[in-house]
Amino acid sequence: MPKANRLAVLLALVPTVALAVAVPVVNRVNPSVFGMPFILFWIVGWVLVSPAFLWFIGRVERRW
């Protein structure tokens, strides 16, 4: 596998692992962040950050 593809796969795994695997680890009601339970803040944060990872993957693979 070329180095760029390997990096792209690793970058794609970061939000996937953060949303799927780490959720049980951060499943806490307290502390609250901006009035939201931490678990909700964690999910919303990763949903908002995930497109940046996808953009960077596109740049690594030179699609744009």
Image: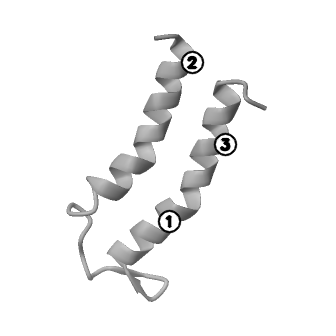
| CA neighbours of label 1 inside 10 A, class few (<14), some (14 to 19), many (20+) | few
Q: Report the quarter where the C terminus lies.
A: top right
| Location of residue 27 in the rendering, given as x and y in whole percent from the top left corner | 24, 71
Extreme residue in the bottom direction = 35
Tell me where residue 35 appears, x and y as whole percent.
Answer: 45, 89
**Label 1: which secondary element:** helix
The circle on residue 45 is 1
Mark 1 and mark 3: span between their CA atoms? Answer: 16 Å
29 is higher (above) or lower (below) than 52: below
Residue type at numbered disc 2: Ala
51 relative position to 45: left or right: right
Residue under label 2, please give it. 4
**Which residue is rendered at x = 63% and y = 49% of the image?**
52
| Furthest-top residue in this view | 2
Q: CB under 8 Å between callouts 2 and 1? A: no
| Residue 54 in picture, x, y percent from top left | 60, 43
Task: Name the element at disc 2.
Answer: helix
Residue 2 locus on image (x, y percent): 52, 10
Query: Extreme right residue here?
Result: 64
Tell me which label, 1 or 3, sits earlier in the chain: 1
52 with respect to 35 (left or right):
right
Whether the residues at callouts 1 and 3 have beta carbons within 8 Å, the answer is no
The numbered dot on residue 55 is 3
Question: On the image, which quarter does residue 63 sit in?
Answer: top right
Instruction: Give yes or no for contact between labels 2 and 3 (Cβ–Cβ under 8 Å).
Output: no
Q: Residue at x 41, y 39 (%)?
A: 13
- In three-dimensional space, the C-alpha distance between marks 2 and 1, rounded to whole angstroms, equals 26 Å
Picture residue at 26% right of the left edge, 65% below the top: 26
Say what secondary structure mark 3 lies in.
helix
Q: Amino acid at mark 3?
A: Trp
